[in-house]
Image: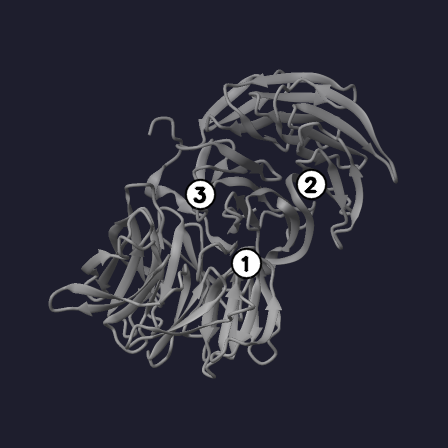
Amino acid sequence: MAGEPGPQGDALCELELQAVIGFNGHIPSGLICHPDREHFIYPLGCTIIIQGLNNNTQAFLHGHTNNVSCVAVSRSGCYVASGQVTFMGFKADIILWDYKKRELLARLSLHKGKIEKLAFSPNDLYLVSLGGQDDGSVVVWSIAKRDPICGSPASARSAGNATVLAFSNCRDEVFVSAGNGTIRVWELDLPNRKIRPTECQTGQLKRVITCIMMAEDDSYFYVGTSSGDILKLYMKSKLMSDYGPVKEKFSLGVTALLLLKTGDLVVSTGGGIVALCKGSNYKLIKKIQVQGGVTSLTLRGQGHQFFVGTEESQIYRLNYNEFKEELIATCHNEAIHDIIFPSGTSDLFATCSKNDIRVWYTPENKELLRITIPNMTCHAIDFMSDGKSIISAWNDGKIRAFTPETGRLMYVIDHAHSMGVTAIAATSDCKRIISGGGEGQVRVWEIGQNTRKLEEVLKEHISAVSCIKIKKNNRECVTASIDGTCIIWDIVRFMRNQMILANTLFQCVCYHPEEFQIITSGTDRKIGYWEIFDGSAIRNLEGSLTGSINGMDITSDGTYFVTGGDDHLVKVWDYNEGEVTHVGMGHSGSITRLRICPGNKYIVSVSADGAILRWKYPHSS
């Protein structure tokens, strides 16, 4: 590749990924408790994370080329299978993993577009896969030979799409598929390499099936529906025995079912209710409410404890006896727009997203505080250097300041910008805030004890301001904009010192710590070094091979800097050599921002899929 600096390919060192904060709660049954009772498994973007229940250890399974759409774990716990989505008309891979060695065993490719669901047979002989609505086929794979045995269309032409699968608990040759107006029991005829379906009759009831739960002895199975009721069907006769609750149906549909040893059912709903019901008459015994529609229910062991995963990317632990929820993991479920460390500490950092700002405790990856402003998007945040407030830029045109300990709203600057506030920075003496807006104005605010005064409006940019950095002496700042200009301002005389023009939408800018140069980057994938004195270009590096560069940060001594962008890679660069020293692969969405923490211990990067990744800083300081 012409223009790509440094020894690319195998010669590059990999960044060590220390921790991931993230969970894709939109995948049905995506959270699975492993049979060893010590770990749970869940997807995030193209990665599958194996996390310790009692300790914070994490292992990562990398191999998918696009977002993971379903996960399954075999009953013995030896195998994990995961399916992905891909582009229309292309084949979507299923990957079979060895759980103990944490490595890829085989790639199974037959389905097109998307893998909807996966299930293992009880003795680990077969894996059955269901393609998405553009594929519509069901395929049985031999785990030992790692190749397909046979396949068939998943549902009759008159019926809708099948979306869920469940294997029999006793026989390796029987499984059930269900979906929109279809419930089928399949038998595998191995000598003839065929699977034969039998339609289950539900009489007058027309339902969209969302989940299946098999009885332990296979005599019957339950299915949950989007209408909020549960049907019970017999395996032998393929007929429905009963359904319920008849009057008080579950609102927003049944999303997952668990059958306990007592014969009772745990039911979760799209409305965020987890309920314990009698298996015989579906009568409610207990119920709790969690945040977000439930997408996963998974048992730990025999059912004394189970875990709940929701669309809001929250994971809860429930004990059967108390039936009280305990929140054990949280993360953003929307794109993260900014990340910032308070000055002088690496133990805390803050991130902002749609609806909220969150403060995290770095060593334990734990959320300490959540500041919620519903239906608003926070574009940028900064800590005041005295640590007494977090200032934030919102799309409703307001600047809001909160206390970092309690999240109490300290003050609001209304109508700060007409088209939303897009960038924000505070001076080190905490007396001024500089903000940038969607209309391109840069505004300087004087912050007193109880007063907020607009000091000056700087009108030069003609499009949204994407990044603001202030010089240490608080006399100068640089603003980058998506109009293709970077402007260096004198914020004492409120005049433009220099203007840098490039054929790009600038996304990020950094002062070199000695403050005689700045580095910029943006959608043209180039990293530009510029002289502050006269705005002249010093050098141009090819920053990425595909996609925009959205975030950059430089070390406090100026020897290294990091970049991240739409190619999902975190790159560490030597500032003087202009060469990549380390690359971090792990993100599955576009990286929006990244920071090197004070003291150069970690690099933390955030992405558009709501993930926060913490990397070990590779160079000894």
Please state which amino acid type lies under the numbered disc 3.
Answer: His
Which residue is located at x 44 percent, y 32 percent?
A: 547
Which residue bears the numbered disc 2? 382
Distance between the alpha carbons at the discs numbered 1 and 2: 32 Å
Among all residues in the image, which is located at the extreme left? 192
Q: Which label lies toward us, 1 or 2?
A: 1
The N terminus - image quarter: top left
Q: Depth check: 515 or 592 in front?
A: 592
Where's residue 41, x and y in %?
A: 44, 63
- In three-dimensional space, the C-alpha distance between marks 3 and 1, rounded to whole angstroms, equals 40 Å
Kindly report which numbered mark, 3 or 1, lies closer to the viewer in this rendering. 1
Q: What residue appears at the point 45 percent right and 27 percent down from the top-left corner?
A: 541
Label 2 sits on what residue type? Asp
Q: Secondary structure at mark 3?
A: strand
Q: Nearer the viewer, residue 379 or 245?
A: 245
- Numbered label tally: 3
How much space separates mark 2 and mark 3, taking CA atoms? 28 Å
